[in-house]
């Protein structure tokens, strides 16, 4: 089950990385409308959502794949770095998307946040077992 969820998340990330900007912006607007969030009133643009999305995706996928890779933290991080680099390279094949090194760095930032979270969680869990 854990592997299935991880594969679904990876597939969704790949899809979001390759669809055109118009569709992606429409999806962002649909989600905002669904949640009753007025993005224009808040001054939040679609580019900002996309930029933060890289970091969130890195974090969520790190937590998800960590269990799928049986707790191998650095293998998980390495696979995700390769995955996010591949998505950016695949964007060179689309007419409407532009790959960017900054996007890779944002994704890696999310992976780093995920790794730090997992390490902190492991340490906290170890302290509780001792008590």
Image (cartoon, rainbow, N blue to C red):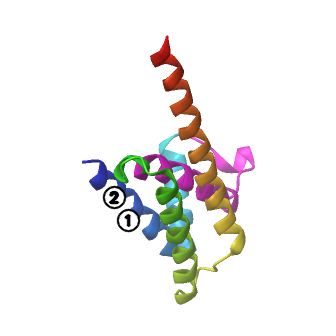
> Which residue sits at x=61%, y=60%?
107
Q: Position of residue 63 (x, y in %)?
A: 47, 46
Q: Is residue 50 visible?
A: no
Q: Is residue 33 visible?
A: yes
Q: Is residue 40 above or below residue 88?
A: above
Give the spatial CA distance, label 1 vs label 2.
Answer: 5 Å
Figure quadrant of residue 89: bottom right
Query: Would you call the spot at circle 2 few (<14 residues within 10 Å), some (14-19), or many (20 or more)?
Result: few
Residue 46, magenta (yes or no): yes
> Which residue sits at x=32%, y=51%?
5
Which segment is the magenta one? 36-65
Q: Position of residue 39 (x, y in %)?
A: 66, 49
Residue 59, magenta (yes or no): yes
Image position of 69 (left or right of 78):
left
Q: The residue tagged with tag 1: helix, strand or loop? A: helix
Q: Position of residue 74 (x, y in %)?
A: 52, 56
The majority secondary structure of the magenta stretch comes to: helix
Q: The residue tagged with tag 2: helix, strand or loop? A: helix
* Number of on-image labels: 2
> Which residue sits at x=75%, y=49%?
43
Q: Are marks 1 and 2 in contact (CB under 8 Å)?
A: yes
Q: Is residue 10 above or below residue 95?
A: above
Query: Would you call the spot at circle 1 few (<14 residues within 10 Å), some (14-19), or many (20 or more)?
Result: few
Residue farthest to the left, as pictured: 1
Image position of 12 (left or right of 46):
left
Residue that badge 2 annotates: 8
Residue in the foreground of this view, choosing between 112 and 40:
112
Res. 126 mark: none
Residue that badge 1 annotates: 11
Q: Position of residue 35 (x, y in %)?
A: 51, 40
């Amino acid at each position: 089950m854990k592997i299935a969820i991880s594969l679904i998340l990876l597939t969704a990330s790949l899809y979001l990385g390759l669809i055109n900007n118009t569709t992606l912006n429409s999806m962002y607007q649909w989600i905002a409308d669904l949640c009753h969030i007025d993005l224009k009133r808040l001054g939040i643009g679609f580019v900002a959502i996309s930029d933060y999305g890289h970091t969130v995706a890195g974090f969520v996928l790190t937590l998800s794949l960590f269990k799928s890779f049986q707790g191998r933290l650095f293998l998980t991080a390495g696979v995700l770095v390769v995955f996010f680099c591949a998505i950016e390279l695949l964007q060179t094949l689309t007419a409407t998307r532009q790959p960017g090194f900054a996007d890779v760095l944002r994704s890696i930032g999310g992976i780093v946040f995920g790794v730090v979270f997992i390490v902190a969680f492991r340490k906290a869990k170890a302290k509780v077992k001792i008590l």
